Amino acid sequence: MGDFMEILFWIIAALIFDSLVGLSGAVTLAIQNDKTMKFLSFALVAFAAGALIGGGFFHLLPEASENIGDFLLVMVLAVTGFVVFLILEVALHWHSCEECKMHAFSYLVLIGDALHNIIDGIIIAASFLISIPVGIATTIAIISHEIPQELGIFGVQVYGGIKRETALKNSLLAQLSCLIGGIAAYFFFDTARALSYYVLPFAAGGFIYIASSDLIPELHKENNQKKLIGFFVFLVGLVFMYLMHFLE
């Protein structure tokens, strides 16, 4: 009983530590210049677009294919995620006025992030069930690639019209969803792990939808010089997620 309680303690501590990544955007609170913040949020949107597409194609879909073993089913689930996020965006637009400055993708990216964090929670818990050192190493690896991604998601919210303080709270709440996955994995490991395999391609489809239909079009709205910078940062996000694949 003592060993199980110790492992549960380590899992919860790691999940809380992982949740704090949601506050990464706090580093921008010191920026008072609106022009600087606007450019930074634009750059973070470009990075997030690359990171979301890279995360979907380089991480989530390959991992789902490997574990499910049915490539067609993985693609069906990914397309389902794509369509569901399209429907969610349409619904969000229906419930907002035409003159509102808030973009629906600001909330869509949080939904996708929460799904992803649930899966990360399952992975963290599973690694601690193997051994505490493996759990610590896995937690550090997950956090290392989540920090820039969370900064991107924070930037997407700010760019979409959400105040920085509110965006921080939203990011923290989305990040806290890892507790759901981690605790579920501890008590219902086999079921949680099996379900996570099917959530992976669904989340990938959602990420790909957000990046391709919402974030990339925002980059095209800028002038040529800023558009070129956005394209470069987009590539940085893609390459970053590709390289992170080799560190997993």
Image: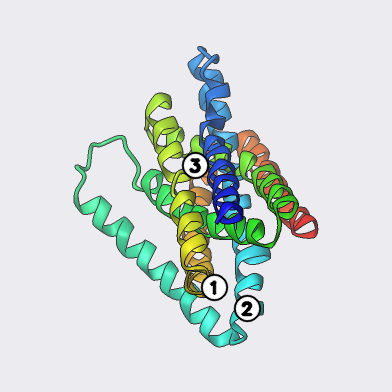
- Up-down relation of residue 68 to residue 137 (above or below): below
Measuring from the top left, give residue 62's x and y in whole percent: 66, 72
The N terminus: image quadrant? bottom right
- Up-down relation of residue 28 to residue 162 (above or below): above
Which mark, residue 67? 2
- Label 3 or label 1, whichever comes before in sequence order: 1
The C terminus: image quadrant? bottom right
Question: What sort of colour scheme is used for the picture?
Answer: rainbow
Measuring from the top left, give residue 63's x and y in whole percent: 65, 71
Q: Is residue 214 visible?
A: no
- Give the foreground label among 3 and 1: 1
Identify residue type, mark 1. Tyr
Distance between the Cα atoms at labels 1 and 2? Answer: 7 Å
Quarter-wise, where is residue 96 in the image?
Answer: top left
| Camera-nearest residue between 226 and 146 | 146
**Residue appearing at x 31%, y 34% in the figure:** 101
- Label 1 or label 2, whichever comes before in sequence order: 2
| Camera-nearest residue between 149 and 15 | 15
Residue annotated with mark 1: 197
Secondary structure beneath label 3: loop
Identify residue type, mark 3. Lys
| Camera-nearest residue between 213 and 222 | 213
Residues tagged 1 and 2 counted as in contact (Cβ below 8 A): yes
Residue annotated with mark 3: 221
**Residue appearing at x 66%, y 49% in the figure:** 142
Query: Around disc 1, counting alpha carbons within 10 Å, would you say few (fewer than 14), some (14 to 19), or many (20 or more)?
Result: many
Distance between the Cα atoms at labels 2 and 3? Answer: 40 Å
Identify residue type, mark 2. Asn
